[in-house]
Amino acid sequence: MLRFVSTASFVRWSCLIAMFACSNARAQEALPKVEPVTIGPFADEIVWPVSGSTKPDATYTSTFGPRQLSIDGYRHDFNRGIEVVCTEGTPIHAVADGEVRIAGKNDSYQRPLVQLRHKKADSKEYYYTNYMNMGEASVSVGQMVSKGDVLGKSGRSPRNFELFRFEVRDGGSPQRFCIHPLGMLPYVDSGPPKIMVDSVAVVRDNMTVAVTTTVPGDEMDLLRVDVVMLDAGQEVAKRSYDLNEWNRAFTPAKDGTKILDQQLVNHVSAEPGRFQRGQSNYELTLVFDDFPVVKNKAKLVIQATATDARGNVSQPAERKNIR
């Protein structure tokens, strides 16, 4: 079910955003420009790391993008992979043919992992897959593995949960190259996301637009949200929030997690709903705080769409009669 944002709630959001916008003005100006991210192509047939087949792994507990981190007081966190609850000692499989680059403990990671490098189809470029929170690795660095081969067994997370983590990094091995794994993994897609325009308001010298989008909880494949301002049918401004682009732009080499672990980044405030395994929907509210103010709002229309990892685009949601 889509969540409607009350007037009181939106006023609180607007005040919070205005405060953050003022206090973080210099930081916002220093952020890099968001550029389009091209991913793939990948192999035609990819398998899941736990099942070792095209059947999706057991319901995962979190997906790529913003979340409320329940194990840390529900603080805001940007997740760069997917996590699957599985019994310690579960065999973990290579999702595609590749070369082992890391096997076991590594100074850059808290827990043992296996990292594979894969050659892209019809290309000289590579992508990487990380199999994290491993208990043990049964492969060695430099070894060539085939799709479905067992890489080792799952272990526990840094907080001692039986939790396997999987990441995909396209174009390079650093964290900034992480992309939504569902852009590669096979799954049964139930259709495009749903989206609604919650509120539009003038805050200081800008217009603020809040939208909420939902996807099924057993898919969690949201990738992108676009919001367009139309004045008498003509586009005045457009703002976008793309998970792959956001990670690429705002994950620097040093202290990479810190920027996106803030709720407000580059004039977009992300409010993910709380999510538990088995929940029917995953929900994300985005508040864009830098649309231009249009004096004559009689012909003003705000239009929003959401796109999933398969490229399915939602029906446009509109907001008219803006005061």
Image: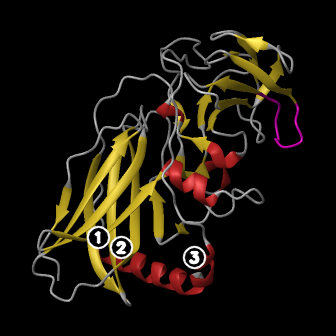
Q: Which residues are magenta?
A: 105-114
Q: Which residue is mark 3?
A: 28
Q: Quadrant of residue 216?
A: top left
Above or below residue 63? Residue 33 is below
Q: Who comes first in sequence, dot 3 or dot 1? A: 1
Q: Secondary structure at mark 3?
A: helix
Residue 294 located left or right of residue 186: left
Above or below residue 137? Residue 170 is below
Tell me the number on the disc at residue 6.
1
Is residue 77 at all visible to an observer of this figure?
no
Looking at the image, which residue is at 57% across and 76% down?
28
Q: Which residue is mark 2?
A: 9
Residue 39 located left or right of residue 250: left
* Contact? badges 1 and 2 (CB < 8 Å): yes
Q: Amino acid at mark 3?
A: Gln
Magenta region includes residue 36: no
